[in-house]
Image: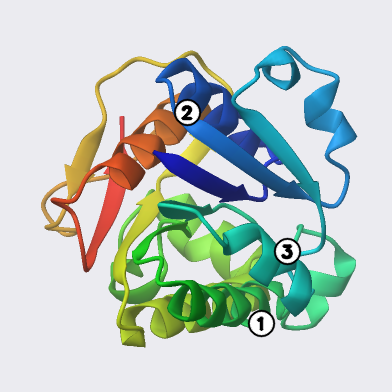
Amino acid sequence: MKLLIAGATGQVGALAVAEALSEGHEVTALARNPARLEQGTAGKSPRLRTVAGDVLDRDAVRRAVAGQDALLLVFGAPLNLQTIANVPVVRTEATGHFIDAMKESGVRRLVVMTGIGAGDSRRSGRAIFRNVIRPLLLGRIYVDMDRQEQLVQASPLDWTIVRPAELTNGPALGNVRTITDYQREPASTISRSDVARFLVTCCASAALPKQCYVISS
């Protein structure tokens, strides 16, 4: 599989690059500073191609998408004073560019990572996350996230949306749960390594189109 990963230098993105390479896929990593990947172990793989570019640059996105089999979007606005006070637009605008480029290039498989609490999973997750962390710190970020999901779901692509539970830096445990009944199946936390593995598996699978998944350990 030829896989484009956008947001490849982020914490989950970098793990997804390494996971995809370990599974034998050809990876194109789109990042503003690809040298961060090239300096690591993954950068030594002959199956890794790095592309310098911003996800908000329509032309850079179009060039990166051409020739791919699948796309993985793992970017988003950082938590800072600006995104606490104002709604960011990076997810919404950039995802629109990727969808347009995919339609132009005939690429159909799209996997997008958002987060627990997005879309119809608003009532899932730990109580402290639902009632304190998300409304007080992440509220504006989630507006952008919800709009991103709406764009993806309205597209004609073979999309899958993955909403991880609260992320940790723990090791991959391999016991990922996919949650559909948000009231009866509580979500807690999940390691970034397990998320990365699940995302890459989704990219390579043709059996998960037009589905949203909350995942937890």
* 175 is higher (above) or lower (below) than 5: above
Q: Secondary structure at mark 1?
A: helix
The residue beneath circle 1 is: 93
Whichever of labels 2 and 3 marks the residue nearer the N terminus, that label is 2
Q: Is residue 51 visible?
A: yes
Residue in view at x 88 percent, y 44 percent: 33
The residue beneath circle 2 is: 20
How far across and down, in percent of the image, does residue 165 sit?
41, 45
Q: Amino acid at mark 2?
A: Ala
Q: Is residue 9 visible?
A: no
Left or right placement of residue 168 versus residue 178 in this view: right
Whichever of labels 2 and 1 marks the residue nearer the N terminus, that label is 2
**Nearer the observer, disc 2 or disc 3?**
2
Q: Residues within 10 Å of mark 1 (few under 14, many from 20)?
A: some
- C-alpha separation, residue under disc 1 versus residue under disc 3: 12 Å
How far across and down, in percent of the image, does residue 112 sit?
45, 59
Pick the front one: 45 or 95: 45
Q: Amino acid at mark 1?
A: Glu
* Quadrant occupied by the N terminus: top left
Q: Amino acid at mark 3?
A: Ala
Whichever of labels 1 and 3 marks the residue nearer the N terminus, that label is 3
- C-alpha separation, residue under disc 2 versus residue under disc 1: 26 Å
**Nearer the observer, disc 2 or disc 1?**
2
- C-alpha separation, residue under disc 2 versus residue under disc 3: 24 Å
Contact check, label 2 and label 3, Cβ < 8 Å = no
Residue in view at x 72 percent, y 12 percent: 41
Res. 77 mark: 3
